[in-house]
Image (cartoon, rainbow, N blue to C red):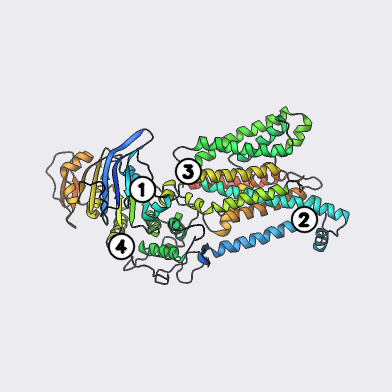
Amino acid sequence: MSTLSGDGTGQRLRAEAVTLGYDKRVISEDLTLAVPDGSFTVIVGANGCGKSTLLRGLARLLKPRSGAVHLDGQAIQRYSSKEVARRLGLLPQAQVAPDGITVADLVARGRYPHQSLLRQWTRDDEEAVREALAATDIGDLAERLVDELSGGQRQRVWLAMALAQRTEILLLDEPTTYLDIAHQVEVLDLCERLRTERGYTLVAVLHDLNLACRYATHLVAMKDGGVVAEGSPADVITEELVEDVYGLACRVVPDPECGTPLVIPRKNVSTTPSAPSEEETR
Amino acid sequence: MTTPRTSPPPVGAPVRRRADPADPAGPSGRGAGAVDLGVRSVRIGPVALPVAPRSVLVVVLLLALAVVVAVCSVLFGEIQMGFPRLVATLSGEGSAFEDYLVMDSRLPRVVNALLIGLALGMSGSIFQTISRNPLGSPDVIGFETGASTGGLVALLVLGSGFAGASVGAVIGGLATAVVVYALALRNGLDGLRLVLIGVGLGALLLSVNSMLIVQADVYDAQEAGGWLVGNLAGASWDGVGWLVVTVSVLCLAAVGLSRPLMIAELADDSAAGLGQRTDRLRMVAIAVGVLLSSIAVAAAGPIVFVALSAPQIARRLTGASGPNLVTSGLTGAVVLVLADHAARELFQPRQVPVGVVTGLIGGAFLAWLLTREWRKGHA
C-alpha cells in the first residue's frame, strides 16, 4: 500500500503526489500510485471518480498541476512524446478509425513512434505488425475495412495497434466497454496472456468489479479522485469497501470458478438472501 | 490488393481461432499468420520507405495522365493543332499565329491550371485530414471566399494593383482560417463544428464580396469580377514563376507533414498515445493548407470543387487511407485542366470562367457527399 518516493526498482511507472484536473476543476489531489512491474493493475471506482483522469495522467496526456509521473526513473514530462510512446502504449476510451482504413493499415500506425523520416517502414515494423495481428487473432481480417467489423473485432484491432507499438507497459481505458460478456472475457484473456507470456505490465480501468477481481493481480479502488485501497483483489474487495466506494450494499462471496471475490448486490427489499449460485448481475 | 496466401473471408464470416493465438508469425513473416500488409519495405542505404504498389502505380499513371491531358488541352479546341506543329512551335519554328495560340494563350493557361490544381488538391487533402471530415475543405468552409474578400479589399478599397491583391488574398485566407479555427476549437477540434462555422462565415464573406463589388465603380467592379468566380482566361506567364516557387515549397512542406497527419487523423488521445501531439501539428498544417489555397485564389480567384473532390477521388484511386497528399495534388491538377478546357471550349465562341464549370459539377458532388455523410451519421 505504501510507496516510497525515489524507489525506482520494480516500479517503472509511478505517480508521485500528482494533482490532476481539467481547466479549473481539480479531479485528484496529491495522489500517489505505483504500478508494480509485470502486474495487471486494475483501477475500479464509481463513475466520475477520476479513474480515466489518472490513466490520462499516467500516459502523459494530462500534465499534472503538481507532483510528477515517473517513468523508468525520470519525470515523464522530460521525455519526448515519441520516447514515451516507445515505452508505454495507450488504448484510449474513444477511438476514431479514419474513413476507409483497413485493419492492417490501422495496426501499422502503431509503429509510428519507432519510425523516422528516413526509416519509415523496416522489417522490424513489418514483423511487429504481423505479430500484433497474430496475437490478437485478427490476421484473417487484415485486409478488411475497420468500418465493417463488429465491436469485439474492432476492439481487438485497436489493441493490436497498441501491441504493434511494442511497449512493455500498456494502459487500457475501459477496454471492455460496449463488448458483450464473451468478448469482454476474450479481451481480458488476451491481456492476461500478454502479461504471463510476454511480461507486459498492464494498467486498465474496468467497470465490471467481478471481472476486475478475476484478472487483476493488483487492484486499485478509487473514490473522489483518491485511492482508498490497493492490493490483491481478495484483500481489497470487501463488503465495506464496495459500500464505501459505490454506495452499494452487497455480499462478497468467493467466485466458484477462481476463488476471487465475487460481488453480489443485495436486493433492495430485505428478503432472505438467496444461495450464492447466481452469476454476474449487471 | 491481392494476397497469395490468405483470401479475405466474406463479410460476417466467423473469425477462425487458432490453437495458440499468441503464436507470432515468425521473424520473416512466413508463418501461418503471413498476410499481405499492402506495403513493402524498400531500402536504399539507410533509408527504409513503405511502398504500397497500388499507390505508386496510381501516382505514375496520374503523372502520365496530367501530361497527356495538358498536351491535349493545348492541341484541341475550336482551333485544332497537330502534335508535330506543337513541337515545332515549342522549338521556336511555329508561325506567328501558332506562337500566339500556344505560347501566349493556351500553354500559360494549362500550366497555371496544373499548378493551381496541384495546390488546391493538396490543400483540400490537408484540411479534410485535420478536420476528419470530407466537407472540411477550404472551398466549403469559406477559406477561398475569405481569400477572395482579401483580394477585393486590396483591389477596391485600398486601390492596390493586382500584385497587392494577391497579397491581400493570402492575408484574407489566413485571417479567415484564424477566425474559423478560433471559433471551432473547444477541447480539441471537432470536425463538424469546424465545417458548420466555416460554412456560416463563408456565407457572410460572400455577402461582403457582393457589397464590395456593388460599392465599387463599374470599371473596377468588372476588373475585380475574377475575384468572385475563379477564372483562368487571362492567365499569362507573369505569375507562373512565383507560382512554381511557392507551390513547390509548400507542396514539399505538405509532403513532410504527411506522416504526422496520418497519425493526427486518429482521435487526439490515440495520436498522443502514439507520440504525436496534435495541437502544434494542426497549426503548421493549417498554415500550409491556407497558404496553398490562398495562393491558388490569388492566381485565379476562388475555384470551388477541386479542393473538395480531389482528395475524395484520390482516396478511391489508391484505396489507401491517410491524406494521400501527392495523389490528391495530382488529381487536382488533372481535374482543373479538364475543367478549364471545358470552360474554354464548350460554350464557344464565348468562354465561361472555370469557377462556373467547377461550381456546376461541384454542386452535384457536394449534394452527393452530403447525402452520403448524412446517411452515415444516421445509420
The disc, 2 or 3, on the residue closer to the chain's N-terminal end is 2
**Residue occupied by mark 3:** B279
Q: Nearer the viewer, residue A87 or A194?
A: A87
**Residue occupied by mark 2:** B74
**Residue occupied by mark 4:** A198
Residue B58, quarter of the rendered image = bottom right
Q: Nearer the viewer, residue B85 or B372?
A: B85
x%, y% of residue A113? Answer: 43, 55
Name the residue: 76% across, 29% down: B217
In the rendered structure, find residue B82 and report the number of the disc placed on it: none
Name the residue: 30% across, 54% down: A202
In the rendered structure, find residue A76 and report the number of the disc placed on it: 1
The disc, 4 or 1, on the residue closer to the chain's N-terminal end is 1
Cβ–Cβ under 8 Å for marks 1 and 2: no
Name the residue: 75% across, 58% down: B72
Give the distance between the C-alpha atoms of the residues marked 4 and 3, in whole angstroms.
35 Å
- Res A21 seen here: yes
Give the distance between the C-alpha atoms of the residues marked 2 and 3, in whole angstroms.
45 Å
Mark 3 surroundings within 10 Å by alpha-carbon count, few (fewer than 14), some (14 through 19), many (20 or more): few
Give the distance between the C-alpha atoms of the residues marked 4 and 1, in whole angstroms.
24 Å
- Res A59 seen here: no
Judged left or right of residue A167, residue B36 is right
Give the distance between the C-alpha atoms of the residues marked 2 and 4, in whole angstroms.
64 Å
Q: Nearer the viewer, mark 2 or mark 4?
A: 4
**Chain of the residue under label 1:** A
Judged left or right of residue A64, residue B137 is right
